[in-house]
Image (cartoon, helix red, strand yellow):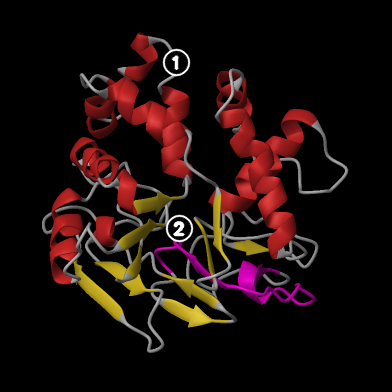
Amino acid sequence: MAVWAIGDLQGCYEPTRRLLDKIRFDPATDRLWFCGDLVNRGGESLETLRLVYSLRANSVVVLGNHDLSLLAIGERREEDQRRVNPDLQRVLFSEDRDALLGWLRVQKLLHVDRDLGWMMVHAGLAPKWTTTLAEQHAREVETQLRGDGFGKLLKNMYGDRPEWSPKLTGMERDRAIVNIFTRMRYCSPRGRIAFDEKDAPGSQMPGLYPWYEVPGRVERDLKIVCGHWSTLGLFIGHGVHAIDTGAVWGGKLTALQLDSEELHVVQVPGRDVSGMAQRSSAG
């Protein structure tokens, strides 16, 4: 048996298949942890989503910002859905969209396995959130996503404010929680997210820190695996294992074995972007 965490897929179906082959994934014995952002930009979001859906009995998924965006678009009028990029339109107008989006909507923001000694989140955690606090805040939003009022949450989750505070209530509280779990890279010691800072550490404005290096942050009792930050690349430090290595940008797709005493990382080439314009920053 092996437990593998896999970085952001972002609609890169062929690299995903190659990676599963390379780690010799066996659905009879193995488990997969997907770090979120299953869709968007890779050109094969429908195939990728169908693949992960087919593996749902053997996998755990946390929601990324692109996954939540897809869910939100799916609740809009058809004419609005037809304005998004063709990659997402193929999901939105597929015959199995209801099954795929219905399944995606009930996935987690945070996955914790104390027996294994790991937790998984798409982007990051607030500096003062212990594992237990993070679980509580994730459940607040997950409960709404799985309930009848999920459309209201998806409609109102967009925006960079407010900053997180335990005193927040209502939609502002939900939005702050979603932003931390799915959009965080840099923040201030008080936890204010710098949404416009997306490049590698060393490029940020003074007074900002990678979320896992903030002075005064709480010590957590579990190792963390996450994605979201492609310009960071493969990073291991401070109990954090960041494994978004830019597959959609022509980098690599990364798997990390979680139940191995030795550090075991497996990578395959990501999407072929030859002849395509390279990004200036990741989203």
According to the image, label 1 marks what residue?
A: 76
Say whether residue 283 is left or right of residue 247. Answer: right
Sequence-earlier tag: 2 or 1: 1
Residue at left offset 59%, top offset 81%: 238
Q: Quadrant of residue 253?
A: bottom left
Q: Secondary structure at mark 1?
A: loop
Membership of 87 in magenta stretch: no
Q: Is residue 57 above or below residue 31?
A: above
**Label at residue 228:** 2
Magenta region, mostly helix, strand or loop? loop
Q: Is residue 206 visible?
A: yes
Instruction: Give the image location of residue 84, x and y in percent.
Output: 33, 26
- In the rendered image, residue 209 lying in the magenta stretch gets the answer yes
The CA distance from mark 2 to mark 1 is 25 Å
The residue depicted at 72 percent of the width and 29 percent of the height is 171
The region drawn magenta spans 208-231
Residue plotted at (32% across, 25% down): 99
Vertical position of residue 113 compared to residue 181: above or below = below
